[in-house]
Image: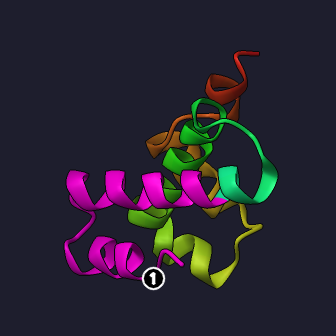
Amino acid sequence: SCGTELTDVLTSGGSDTARVNLGNCIAQCISDGSGLSRGCTDCYGSIAACSTSFCLQPCAADPGSAECAQCALDNCPSLDECTGL
């Protein structure tokens, strides 16, 4: 359901506005599907949008690769930031 927002990220070169819109869409989708609050899902949406924006090339080829993981670590908030751990 976030196809338009994903396209905007890809065609804008990962602009901040497009990335925020994609993160919001993903967060809302997670919230709607899980019943978790938007406060909880916002960070997860941000991580997904960030990874899409900055790490598409290394992660599209192999999402489980060390290169993909390192790209996310270098460019995006960590899961620890979302959970507060």
Q: Quadrant of the C terminus?
A: top right
Nearest the eye: 50 or 38: 38
Q: Position of residue 46 (x, y in %)?
A: 49, 46
Residue at 53% in and 53% down:
71
Nearest the eye: 81 or 24: 24
Nearest the eye: 14 or 7: 7
Residue range (magenta): 1-29
Residue 79: name its quadrant: top right
Q: Position of residue 42 (x, y in %)?
A: 54, 40
Residue marked by disc 1? 3
Q: Quadrant of the N terminus?
A: bottom right
Q: Position of residue 45 (x, y in %)?
A: 55, 50
**Against 7, is 14 above or below?**
above
**Against 15, is 72 above or below?**
above
Residue at 27% in and 64% down:
14
Residue type at numbered disc 1: Gly
Nearest the eye: 31 or 65: 31
Residue 83: name its quadrant: top right
Would you say 78 lies left or right of 77 here?
right
Dot 1: what SS? helix
Would you say 67 lies left or right of 50 here?
right
Predominant SS of the magenta segment: helix
Density class for disc 1 (Cα within 10 Å; few <14, some 14-19, many ≥20) is: few
Residue at 39% in and 63% down:
53
Whether residue 41 is in magenta: the answer is no
Q: Position of residue 18 (x, y in %)?
A: 27, 62
